[in-house]
Image (cartoon, rainbow, N blue to C red):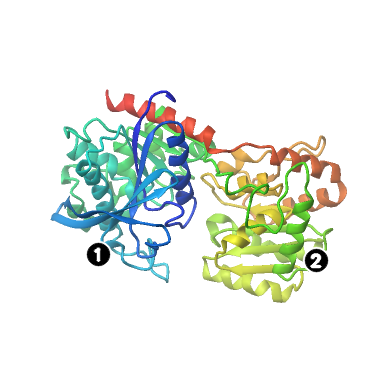
Amino acid sequence: MKDSKLRIVMISSECAPYAKTGGLADVVGALPKILRQRGHDVRVIIPKYSLIDYNKYRLQPFLGTMGVWMGNGQEWCTVHFADNEGVPVYFIESNKYFDRPGLYHDASYNDYQDNPRRFGFLTRAALQLCRDTSFAPDIVHVHDWQSALGPAYLKIWHWNDQILGRAASLLTIHNLAYQGVYSASHYEYLGLQWGNFTANKFEDHGRINFLKGGIQYADMVNTVSPTYANETRTPETGYGLAMYLTDRGDDYIGILNGVDYAVWNPAVDQRLPANYTSHDLSGKGVCKEELQRRFGLVEDPNVPVFGVVSRLAAQKGLDLLANGVEGILNSMVAQFVILGSGDPDLQTYFSRLPSRYPGRVGSFIGYNEDLAHLIEAGSDFFIMPSIYEPCGLNQIYSLKYGTLPVVRATGGLEDTVQQYNEATGEGTGFKFILPTPGALADTIGWAVSTYFDRKPHLQRMIQTAMAQDYSWERSAAGYETAYERALRNQQK
């Protein structure tokens, strides 16, 4: 497949560095670059949100007007262009849909009520852009529910289209819990034909389910880790779609996300006060000292620091930490730094914790990229107690930074972290199974005892962790295989 040059268009609601709320943006920002290096012609299409700085990212006009046919007639938009390290990125501008503060919801985390129309329009506009520029893709690669209608549009409206008629589709599911379920009152606007509003396609208890329809129509479906692919085939983790994913058989696979080591690598990370490698870890000590200083912790190199960079949400297991951290602080020698935002109750709890345990806990409510890098580098351990985790990126960053992950054995965390073997010193982190505060506390205690009592094991684990390779090269090869299978399925 590496010798077969493909034309690929990716349609997404996010792409780093332009618009990001999570790992989806990182994938869409990084994967096209690697695919392009491997010889493929890859183009990305996202919304032109008002938060995207036109001058900062050097956007330029591309199409002054473009007509897009929706179920109620033709609507209009404009298109802009930017070069993302060799990857063409196109921005669909519609003040009606994208000129607002948030990507998906307002400041109170209430979904925009017209989300199905916003992202239905984005997807149709992206396909129209291909037609208007005569870019005939071999692959239309859509991501999550926001662009999951793409495969359906190809088969319903463009099956005999000169530009799009031969395109195969791949749907990547980054998080199955978010499916795009909305009132059927939007269905007419989406232009999907009422004959397709059935239980095995778009209908979900009388409502529209974008992701469900995408699973049905896509030529190939993948998610972002092999373990999560298996978990989502079960009723417990399938969120109502397990049966439909199981029915896809071998056409539903898991491809582990990669990371961009040009950005997340302590040897070259420009956000750190000192760089370091596995051969010389002295810079990690400098980072730890700076981390303790920045978060108001006692500056002691001999106290283990546990870092958290996360959405403060139940899915991320941060309630497990909230319910157990004080018992840990009262019984163990350890420090904690927490960076994140989300659930108001968790925000309040973690913002008040430093005043109750001064010098031992630091927190920053919100997000700060510099602090995120400093926590990865300066911590000794990184906590990710997720209830479920499709892939996860921070644990992979942590490995490269020699910061041993403490994770629940689920999804991509299970796939990327090797359990510590206390008999041999092998492993790259500490894993637990039960999603309880006690299981997390016990595992943190295991890490603390290893820090103080088994220093040679700790050093061996750090060396092993930093030697792991989760670069995008391996992931890109997996996507090339998925594209090849999608093309075969489309031609059946």
Task: Tell me, for residue 299, which label it has, or none.
Answer: 2
The residue lying at 49 percent from left, 40 percent from top is: 224
Q: Is residue 403 above or below residue 342?
A: above
Locate residue 326, reporting x and y percent: 72, 66
The local secondary structure at tag 1 comes to helix
Q: Look at label 1 and name its amino acid.
A: Lys
Residue 4 percent across, percent down from the top left: 38, 24
User: What residue do we see at 73% from left, 50% from top?
Assistant: 443
In the image, 407: left or right of 118? right
Q: Quadrant of residue 422?
A: top right
Judging depth in this view, the residue of 427 and 250 nearest the camera is 427
Amino acid residing under circle 2: Glu
Q: Which residue is the site of mark 1?
A: 96
Q: Residue at x 68, y 48 (%)?
A: 401
Q: Quadrant of residue 243?
A: top left
Instruction: Classify 10 Å Cα crowding around label 1: few (below 14), some (14-19), many (20 and above).
Output: few
